[in-house]
Amino acid sequence: MSKELRNVSFAEVFGFVWTYWRRLPFRLGLVVIGVVSAVLLEILIPGASAELVTRVQAMGSGGSREATWAAIGVLLSLFALQALIRNLYMRVWMYFASRTMRSLVNDGFWRVQRFSSNWHSNAFAGATVRKITRGMWAYDQLSDIVVIDTGPALLLLAGISVAMYLRDPVMGLYFGSAVAVFLLISITMSLRYVAPANRVSNQADTRMGAALADAVTCNTVIKSFGSEIREDQRIAAITQSWRDKARRSWLRSINTGALQSLMVLFLLGGLLVIVMVRAGEEPAALDDMVYVITSYFLVNGYLRNIGWQVRNLQKAVNELDDLVAISKTELGVADRPDAPEFAPGSGEISFDSVGFRYANQPRSLFEDLSLQIAAGEKVALVGESGSGKSTFVKLLQRLYDVDAGRIVIDGQDIAGVQQETLRQAIALVPQEPILFHRSLAENIGYARPDATIDEIVEAARKAHADEFISRLRQGYNTLVGERGIKLSGGERQRVAIARAILADAAILVLDEATSSLDSITEHLIQDAIHNLMQGRTAIIVAHRLSTIRQVDRILVFEDGRIVEQGRHDELMSRRNGRYRRLFEMQALGFYDDGQDPGKLDNTLDSNQGRAAG
């Protein structure tokens, strides 16, 4: 089974990002070359400025005017060339970033789609969506900080330190040491002080998104119980928790920013003090002063940005945590690397000594379950809730992997074939159909993407769905709303039946497919289902036992075991049989465990006699 999402380290986040960067090595290389070139040009600007001042000063004592114009040209060329290079690599970066963000969402969606049913049953859909989209934008922020902002800034600061040291060793050593102290304190504050608060704030943000999505999705339930105020109060409590945690996170960021501003003040103030002291000790050249002042204004903005970028970098890393965790979470039910496609056949099914236990249950539901279903056989599964009927169908679809034994369909162990192709060979009509917020044609055609509109309409006619679709203003182009909320329960079920008809699979699973229909429509759908089952292996999860009298075999489940099997008449002939008791409870409506079985049998026989007469 899949593991729960866990906390992710700083190194894991950058390792995750690197796996995407290395997919486009040529474009990444162009961006890096552009960034380095632009930084090197910027490092030359203070020297070019000092040279220009020297040339202007020399003109007063007969210096060359041409040399001055040349110095002006060099300085302007540096600015122009730097701007041109930055423009070019930003164009490449725009392509690189958008393509990577697209891959992040696609890959996250791919994994979530393939996580086991157990994972999805323990995850909020709204929270999962928020984790993926928030991770995408967090990546955008992180990559911009590393490649476009912080990376060039660090390179520039190192370059200025070296250049300043070459002009004046004392100045260069002080500047480099001060920058190192600034970075050390900034990073430590971000990792140890800001990061924990950011992580807690992000968790609260995820809970808030999940709660909102849950309430909006269940709005019909809220309205039916008149509980709008109660839900308002619940959301208010959750948003208050988010507010408290977000304020704490923001306050820590502000405190860190204030400390960084103070450090910048001392760093640059100390630099100016050194300049003035050394100017008093020996004659200071005007060009050296210009160099220092130009460097000061250049690095001042970068240092302030580094403090801000370090905080944002940590925030981006925190917000990428969930997406990285998703990428490292086991799929739960995974295909083997060399798994072939499932080859559909006649629909023969075999459960061979199958054992299965849900992860959150103390004991196994199935132990040594063996069963053969012949191709074309119609089988009904009956039993009380929790007896194993739904689990049987889920294992057949390989929504879970068995713990022991194997399940074979048409001679193929389903654990060794591709899941998607296996499920494409099984048509399912659930008791509560879920539809996409798409058109009716798209929902019916989902079973066969290549189906023509004529084939879709024909399937709808066979399911008696065309009768209500044709009355709609937009017909088959009508959007059904989220989860099909614009349609009634019976209409959704008819769409699901039409979808199964169009699938034309050898194996058909019906989860009481007429339970939401009125009596007239039910008669029509029963006829459609009867025709649909011809020539197919049909498995019917039966809740109303009166609907399964004509199946070839009835399997009676109890605590994960098949305690009885046979045709309806055969099972009803067993006076103390489990199936007969279940049928009597539904048919007569007065059975309890303390009733005399003989009296119950006499009552049943009497009712059957009156019905026959």
Image: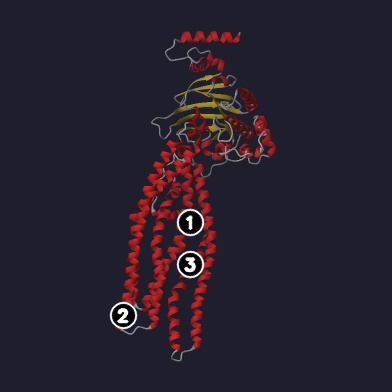
Q: Are marks 2 and 1 in contact (CB under 8 Å)?
A: no
- Is the C terminus in the top left, top right, bottom left or bottom right quadrant? top right
Is residue 184 shown left or right of residue 124?
left
Q: Which mark is residue 278?
A: 2
* Residue highlighted by disc 1: 140
Q: Can residue 200 be seen?
A: no
Depth check, mark 2 against mark 1: the one in front is 2
**Which sits in the foreground, 537 or 10?**
10
Percent position of residue 409, x then y: 56, 32
**For the residue marked with disc 3, what is the amino acid?**
Val
Spatial separation of the CA atoms under disc 2 and disc 1: 45 Å
Depth check, mark 2 against mark 3: the one in front is 2
**Which sits in the foreground, 499 or 230?**
230
Q: Secondary structure at mark 1?
A: helix
**For the residue marked with disc 1, what is the amino acid?**
Asp
Residue visible at 43% across and 51% down in the picture:
319
Q: Which mark is residue 35?
A: 3
Depth check, mark 1 against mark 3: the one in front is 1
Please state the total of marks drawn on the protein image. Answer: 3
Using the rendered view, name the quadrant where residue 544 is placed.
top right
Spatial separation of the CA atoms under disc 1 and disc 3: 17 Å
Residue visible at 38% across and 45% down in the picture:
240
Percent position of residue 450, x then y: 65, 41
Using the rendered view, name the quadrant where residue 355 is placed.
top left
Percent position of residue 177, x then y: 32, 69
